[in-house]
Each structure stands twice: as C-alpha cells, then as structure tokens.
C-alpha cells in the first residue's frame, strides 16, 4: 500500500462519552492501521455533538476522553494530527459556504436525520438537519482523498462527493476539491447490542449489559459476555444459518474483530458446541486486548495538561492546512478577507 502514502484521510469520533467496543472495532482500531499508509487527520467532532443538548462540563470531559482513547489505542500524535474540531474555525466557515451550495432536496433525503429526529422533527435543531454539510467541510477543508465509513455514514459521504463536485462546477475550479473515496473494511461488521442483535450497540441503551465500554473492568466484561443473548441451540456449522440468528452473528463479528481470525474459521472451531466455551474464549480475548487500553485511558485522563498539549499541537498542524484551504475558497467565491 506504499503508493497511497501521500493521500489524506479524515475521520472523527463524537465525544458522546462511554465509548464502547463498537466505536473501537468500527472506527478507532482501523484508524491505527490507516496512519501507516496515509496522512491522517483524526478529529474529535465536538461541533457535531452539540446538535443535541450537552452538559458543557461533561462535553469537555468527553472530548478529553476521546483524545485519551485515540492515544491509548495506538494513534501516534507524531504521525497523525489529533485535534478537536471546534478549535479550527475554518470547519465552520466552510460549512456555511456549503450551506449555500447544498440543495434542500439533498438534505431532505438524508435518512439519518429522520432516524435521529424521529416523529418530533419539528423540534429537532437545525444543526442536526444541516449536520452533513459540516461533515463535508470537515473532510474537504483538508482536501481528504479517503474517508473510512460505516454503513450509517455512506449516504453522508455521497453527499460530500456531490457537494465537492457542485462547488468545483459552480465556481469553475475543476479539481479544487478532490472527490473523496470511501474506505470500507469488509472484515469489520457493525457491532450490535449484546441484548438485541438487530439494534446497534449504543450508549443510549438503558441497559449497561447491552454494551462493553472501553472503561469496563475485566470482571464486568466477562459478566456481560456471559449474559449476552445467543440462542437455545448449539453453534451452527454454516454461515447461512448463523446469519439468521443475529445475536450469534454479532458475537462472531466481535470475536473476529478482536482476534482478526476469519469468521468461517471460528465457525469451524466452535460448530456443534454449546456457547459456554465460545463465550469464555471470547471474554478472554476481549479482556486481553482491552486491558492495556483501558489502563492507559485511565492514566491519561489523570494528566489533563498532557492531553491539552496534544490537542494544541494537533490544532496548530491542522490549522496550517485548513487556513490555506479556506483562504483559497474565499478567493474562489469572491469573499474579501483583509490580511494584516
């Protein structure tokens, strides 16, 4: 993959608190891999977080916790740019310009707004509605060429591509913004609730047993896996049968994500057995992988000064790139900016 070293990746995680193994397997673990082959910008998307009501003190703490999680998981601030989104004003500046480029019809098609706003969409914040334009700005302010995406973000990346193409066309600046390509890791599946394999693992679930937090102690992890829903049967021997039982499929996805052993090999190993041995082995591998990460997160959270230093260093690096882009955009659009 050495030929893609000069390409740029942008991705981020919301500081929603209580990050869990779905965040780790679906995003952060992949970020660690990507920094070997790409120029990476990993932000903490705190502006996205405030599309719903936040407690300011908790938001600040959660922002630092995401920074700590990035570093504890293996993201190297010397190789990758780690920063919080709100520290770079160019994100918001470009988002406003994209608000004026994006068509209402495009935003009306975004299914995530409908899912999050639910039946009470008239009371949802306008920020939640135009959230995809800010996401496009996050990506394009660094002229990112690649974006790791899960299934729930594919539509937003398609919109980003549409916005980039329309901006380039409207202002006759062909190729100014790249058309970012998705990075889809087919070996990583969406991680679902331990209690209901049809629902995404989420901190909003009232049951603590539905998810494994990155801050859970070993005994909590073992207990949650033991209680995880399976089925009144033994491990099937064919993937087609497993796909019909969402909870078993989810546990296999988690096992494969942590062990990096393919699902068909795991199925062959455990077929015909009851789930006690499978769950015990799964608990062991999760504990083994998470224990050093959990310990490091907790250690880093005791050193706020260090985390702020990392974020400031990232802010300075990100600002240098973002400011160049926004200055070029102002010139292209015809907006005056007095330089002192």
Image: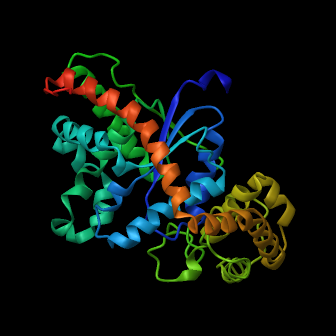
* Rendered location of residue 39, percent (x, y): 55, 32
Tell me if I can see residue 194 in this picture.
Answer: yes
The quarter of the displayed image where residue 164 is located: top left
Vertical comparison of 263 with 247: above or below: above
Image coloring type: rainbow
307 or 86, nearer to the observer: 307
* Rendered location of residue 316, percent (x, y): 43, 39
Quarter holding the N terminus? top right
Vertical comparison of 83 with 340: above or below: below
Q: Is residue 164 left or right of residue 280?
A: left
The quarter of the displayed image where residue 16 is located: bottom left
Quarter holding the C terminus? top left
Residue, far front: 340
Q: Residue at x 63, y 45 (%)?
A: 76
222 or 310, nearer to the observer: 310
* Rendered location of residue 122, percent (x, y): 15, 66
Tell me if I can see residue 189 in this picture.
Answer: no
Q: Residue at x 65, y 55 (%)?
A: 73
Q: Is residue 230 left or right of residue 85?
A: right
Vertical comparison of 155 with 233: above or below: above
Q: Is residue 146 left or right of residue 105?
A: right
Q: Disc count in the image? A: 0
Q: Is residue 218 left or right of residue 105?
A: right
Q: Residue at x 34, y 56 (%)?
A: 48
42 or 159, nearer to the observer: 42
């Amino acid at each position: 993959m050495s030929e893609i070293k000069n390409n740029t990746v942008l991705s981020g995680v919301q500081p929603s608190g209580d990050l869990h193994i779905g965040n780790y397997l679906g995003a952060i673990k992949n970020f660690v891999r990507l920094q070997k082959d790409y120029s990476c910008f990993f932000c903490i998307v705190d502006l996205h977080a405030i599309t719903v009501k936040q407690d300011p003190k908790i938001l600040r703490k959660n922002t630092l916790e995401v920074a700590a999680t990035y570093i504890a998981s293996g993201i190297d601030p010397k190789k990758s740019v780690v920063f919080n989104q709100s520290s770079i004003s160019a994100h918001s500046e470009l988002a406003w310009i994209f608000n004026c480029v994006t068509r209402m019809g495009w935003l009306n098609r975004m299914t995530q707004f409908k899912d999050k706003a639910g039946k009470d969409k008239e009371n949802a914040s306008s920020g939640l509605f135009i959230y995809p334009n800010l996401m496009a700005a996050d990506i394009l302010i660094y002229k990112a060429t690649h974006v790791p995406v899960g299934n729930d973000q594919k539509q937003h990346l398609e919109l980003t591509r549409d916005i980039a193409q329309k901006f380039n066309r409207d202002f006759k600046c062909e190729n100014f913004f790249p058309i970012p390509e998705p990075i889809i890791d087919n070996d990583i599946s969406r991680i679902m609730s331990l209690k209901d394999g049809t629902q995404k693992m989420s901190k909003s679930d009232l049951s603590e047993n539905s998810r494994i937090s990155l801050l859970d102690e070993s005994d909590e992890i073992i207990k949650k896996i033991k209680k995880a829903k399976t089925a009144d049967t033994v491990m099937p021997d064919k993937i087609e049968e497993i796909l019909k039982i969402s909870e078993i499929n989810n546990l296999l996805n988690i096992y494969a994500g942590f062990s990096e052993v393919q699902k068909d090999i795991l199925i062959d190993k455990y077929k015909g057995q009851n789930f006690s041995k499978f769950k015990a082995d799964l608990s062991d591998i999760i504990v083994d992988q998470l224990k050093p990460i959990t310990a490091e997160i907790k250690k880093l959270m005791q050193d706020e000064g260090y985390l702020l230093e990392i974020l400031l260093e990232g802010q300075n690096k990100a600002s240098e790139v973002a400011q160049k882009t926004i200055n070029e955009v102002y010139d292209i659009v015809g907006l005056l900016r007095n330089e002192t």
